Image (cartoon, helix red, strand yellow):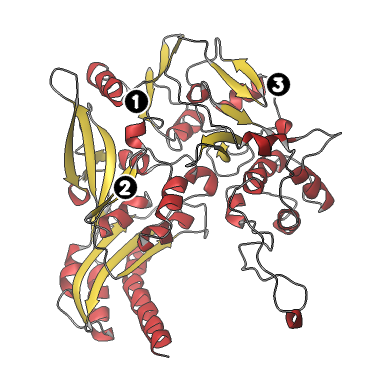
Amino acid sequence: MPDIAVTVNGQQRPLVGTPAHATALDWLRDSGLSGSKEGCAEGECGACAMLLATPTADGGTAWTPVNACLVPVYALDGQEVVTAEGLGSPEDLHPVQEKLAEAGGSQCGYCTPGFACSMAGEYYRADRTPIEATDAADGPCPVHDPEHGPNGFDLHALSGNLCRCTGYRPIRDAAYTLGSPEADDPLQQRLAQPAPEPVATDAEVDGARFVRPASLVEALRILQEEKDALLVAGSTDWGVEVNIRGRRAPLVVAIEQLPELRTLTIEDAVVEIGAALPLSEVEKRLDGRIPLLAQLFPQFASRLIRNRGTFGGNLGTGSPIGDTPPALLALRASVVLASLAEGGSGVVLREVDLADYFTGYRQTVKRADELIRAIRIPLPLATTTAFHKIAKRRFDDISSVAVAFALDIDGGIVTGATIGLGGVAATPLRARATEDALIGKPWNIVTVKAAAEILRGEGTPMSDHRASSEYRSLMLNTALLKLYSATVIESKEVSA
């Protein structure tokens, strides 16, 4: 097996002797690249952001910002990253660094390298285009919405970066004054070349082992033979366990690069999404094809997290407050589980309705020798959908309550209803009593108020530091009323 190494800022750096549980952030700082900082160690502040070379559909490369504090460094074997030091130097600033300095976008400077990397990822985004200017009568100010600049800069690119002293106005100003990369920009030129291929990895240090299997069959064979094997995809959950709780695993198996888990197909009767395809990539490929998921994605953590997080990981943890389960439940999704065939030469698949997948707090029907291969969403989709996430912050936060609706309303009558809930029980669940109270009834305020009272009583919400049980029940009660209000307003707008 070739030497285990990572290309950092154009230079190959070996990983010899690095602990198997080490994060990319710790390794970078131990290597003398201290620009990346540890702020929270759980992917919420973005001070550790770096750029990862990822493949594009046309065979080129994209610079994708990720949280270095969550990525196992051995997951970067054979890969290529750029840190703040690789963007520019004090004598030759990168355009992003230059604009941040001009706008006064840095005060203590602790978070600045992470901002610079996230901003650079958006700077090099291939489809970022300036927005057309307004008519002359409106003056020279370009038209843009509150979350996009006149240069096409998407502020969601910075949603995972926190600044505690400068304030965001100068940082936003810097982002909105960025132009387009010059043709001779080395990082821009790099995008025309292919991204590094996945590399099979097997590293053992001080009794702990990190493995990247070469195939799905090999991954399943390891699961069958090694009962203590821990599957890791984006590591946005496991990375927190390593950093905050000091968790260590004797064997980590990285599966996020397996091609069988990175597919997305749309057929007449089903949409199938690979379990290890990053959520940002799913969002891009679906391009609004599933409106309920289109509402979910911007509210799922931050862009930095979505660039690594996966459906498989969110379902694999079995968490009752994961954002994707309520939406997938409302979409009547199923989970495709894979295991090794008898004889060990092939793969056996079994499909489980997501409503039957969760069996208890962080417990599922998935066996120890299985992994999540894909998520299947049946077509056609419901005509009226909505995703309500109640949290303390609008973005980059864990939900107190999540409610997903998928209704079919024909001629003013509810002909179909599926409602997924999160944060109100030991598992994500379907609000079946509320569904039954809606189906066959007229979609009017009388029906909605009666069903809302039933929805209030669904689940067994508890009180914790995020919300009381009473508040959670109240949010369930108001969710259906909020949906009804939105449909009435939409109906009036259409008729007008």
**Residue occupying image coordinates x 74% and y 53%:** 179
**Residue occupying image coordinates x 55% and y 14%:** 18
Q: Amino acid at mark 3?
A: Gly
**Which of the pair 181/482 is nearer the observer?**
181
Question: CA separation, marks 2 and 3?
Answer: 43 Å
The answer, for residue 343, to whether it is visible in the render is yes
Question: CA separation, marks 1 and 2?
Answer: 28 Å
List x then y, in percent, for residue 281: 45, 46
**Residue occupying image coordinates x 50% and y 33%:** 244
Q: Which residue is mark 1?
A: 230
Within-10-Å neighbours for mark 3: few <14, some 14–19, many 20+: few
List x then y, in percent, for residue 337: 22, 36
Within-10-Å neighbours for mark 2: few <14, some 14–19, many 20+: few
* Residue ranking furthest to the bottom: 496
Q: Amino acid at mark 2?
A: Thr
- Of mark 2 and mark 3, the one earlier in the sequence is 3
- Of mark 1 and mark 3, the one earlier in the sequence is 3
Q: Which residue is mark 2?
A: 265
Q: Which residue is mark 3?
A: 32
